[in-house]
Image (cartoon, rainbow, N blue to C red):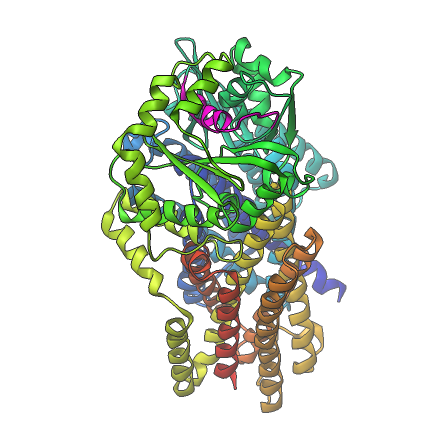
Amino acid sequence: MRARKLAISGVAIALMVVGFTSTVSQVMLMRELVATFYGNELLYGLTLMAWLVWGAVGAWGIGARTSGRVHISLAAFGAGVGAMLPLLVLQMLLLRGIRVILGVTPGAYIDFGSTILIVLLIPALFCPLAGLLFTLGTRLIIERNGTAGYAYFLESCGAVIGGSLVSFLFIHWLGTFQTILFVGVLNLILAAYLIGGAPRHSRLALPVLLLAGIVVALAGGMALDKWTLSWQWSDVVSFVESPYGRLIVQARNGQRIFYTNGLLSFETQSTFPEEIVHFPMLAHPHPRNVLLIGGGAAGNLREILKHPIQRVTYVELDPQVIAMARAHLPTSEAVVLDDPRVRVILTDGRHYVASTPKHSFDVVILDLPPPTTGSLNRFYTREFFAQVRNVLSADGLFALGLPSAENYWNPELTRRNVSIYETLKTSFTSLLAITSGDHLFFLATSGSFPVDAGTMSERLITRAIQSRQVTPEYIEYVFSNDRFKMDRQRLMTGRGVRLNEDLVPICYYYDMALWLSRFYPAVGEFFERAGLINLAWLSLPLAFVVLVTRYRRRWAVPVAIAGVGLAHMMLQVVILIAFQTVHGTVYSGVGMMVTAFMLGLALGGALGNRMSRRWTNRDPAHMGETSTLTGATHRGLRVGLILVQIGVIVLSSLLLGLFHVYFEMPPPSFGILAAAAGCITGAAFPLAVLALGEHTASMAGWLYGADLLGGAIGAGLGATLLLPLLGIPQVCVLTALIGVAGLLCLL
């Protein structure tokens, strides 16, 4: 037993490093894509789908097809591990330079076609190698009397370590290239050991190499970050990689311009904060206590303080926004953060509103981006509006704004605007819509709304407010032009829209269709027609798959594994979106969720291996030997896979019930659910390899590829289409149906 452990220790460590590197690089790729394209769920889903598909190409299309035909040595495997570093660096360099290659101005959107092409092709640089290394590593493990399930367990353990470090350490302390180089150095050191063997004085050599590698990663990574950012950003005075995105500050002709994830966040000398603030503040007769969610550093605080208030509470999620504002805003702008009437709270805005006593504020102003993502959509739902109503005084007023259009509202824009308008009406009895330029402002209250241009102008003069944009003449123009009445009619006559809710976040589906329509109207129209999708239509392909496996029995296990991968990704999306809705976008919390998924995969892999040993009735030392399994053994292994499908059905049903009855669960509860979903998926792989009767690296590669392809379908459809369209409850039902289909395939 000791000899066996020594024989596979080098490959075992290498497989863990493969899982570790893949997970870290996946997170860094997603962050870089968001910073380059300002992504929404469509981008996230497509990136994850491309990652899984290209991984399947490596594991299935290359690894499984060449296994047994090409000799693989430990040194060759080590060379593959070492090749990860240059591919990761090349991947990041291409992304950093893509705006320059395409000739896109900093802060502008990249067109949809180019975005999709890049998102689908960039992972092709690295992911096939990661998938190939899993298959080759599995083969080396089997040759050393290990099992394919043991290889899956090792890779999952590496992923757990990688997910934990990147979520809780790397993104807080290291830049993008520093993280990539640090991970790459570990790969190179391991590759050198696999190729040349451990040196005589390895106890001394290893810490020396690690220390040198850390120095190179920190210094070289910082230099690479600055150099590559200078390709697309001129006049940069500062940049920082926050856990919530990349912040960049430009200085030009005395003006400071702030960008978040590649798009313009705000700029000094702008008059836009006047419109955000003065419309709601002038609509209230006596604003004393004000809550501002977002936008304080952009000038909103400055404008609020012009009114006779007692206190303004400014809630900002990202501490780096405040730090950058203090460091780079003009002194006259930054000083408002230290005004005694200002209280800055660094937390999630929704969490703060939910924990605030009733009737605490006279005015609440929401200044956040539109609901382009699931995490932003939670600030535009029926549940959040009800929470805002509770913290307002009896005559309190709530204000929010949305990018709109000055004259023409296309169908996608109309649906998005009407959905939010109708959702506001569930909590507020009086609403006023004001169009200013290409922005639509909503003012909402539970009391009366005797507000007109004359009242606002009088209050502006009485309060002696000095402003450049919002003047009595401008207020009169806004209330008297044709758009004021026309937009009200559009909002009142909108038909066929649905309310935006936590469990059914339809508004970010509407916003996604709006985003697509800007580039290709036909694509936006397709997304609108996709609204006809329902569970009955989605059940048809599942029934077809079950019928096919009745005639092709050998396909049953791979199809069931693909179904488990699909169900796992659906459950992962459901749990993550539910967690973000309840507990906010605190990245360490989401990191905990991802780590819990990966921990579940590792535990499930260990459980699957244990079940396999029990049903095959073999000694662990002989698990790698080829033998013919008895009919009873095959039945036992299929029973294990059937239990996995039942687990999918039970967990999906449990989520459906929990989210209806006890949606606002504490964070550990979501972590337990995430680990359970991962455990179910992890247990399936080792059982499936043996159930097919071929304990080979080739078969492991085929099944790993099927798992990845199923996950790719779940990623491509789950976050981008099904969850916002059907909602969390119906996606849980669909996932249970996937488990039922897998169960019928195996019976």
Which residue range is magenta in the image? 270-289
Does residue 370 lie above or below 502 as drawn? above
Q: Is-magenta flag for residue 170? A: no
Left or right relative to 1: residue 129:
left
Does residue 110 lie above or below 254 as drawn? below
Coordinates of residue 559 in the picture (x, y in percent): 45, 74
Question: From this viewpoint, is residue 189 visible?
Answer: no
Image quarter (top left, top right, bottom left or bottom right) of the N terminus: bottom right
Coordinates of residue 663 in the picture (x, y in percent): 63, 58
Question: From this viewpoint, is residue 424 visible?
Answer: yes
Left or right relative to 163: residue 367:
left
Does residue 296 lie above or below 129 as drawn? above
Viewer-nearest residue: 29 or 425: 425
Coordinates of residue 96 in the picture (x, y in percent): 41, 32
Left or right relative to 64: residue 678:
right
Viewer-nearest residue: 382 or 726: 382
Viewer-nearest residue: 224 or 113: 113
Residue plotted at (45% across, 54% down): 499
Q: Residue furthest right?
A: 2
Residue plotted at (28% across, 56% down): 526
Coordinates of residue 278 in the picture (x, y in percent): 47, 23
The picture quadrant where one finds residue 182 is top right
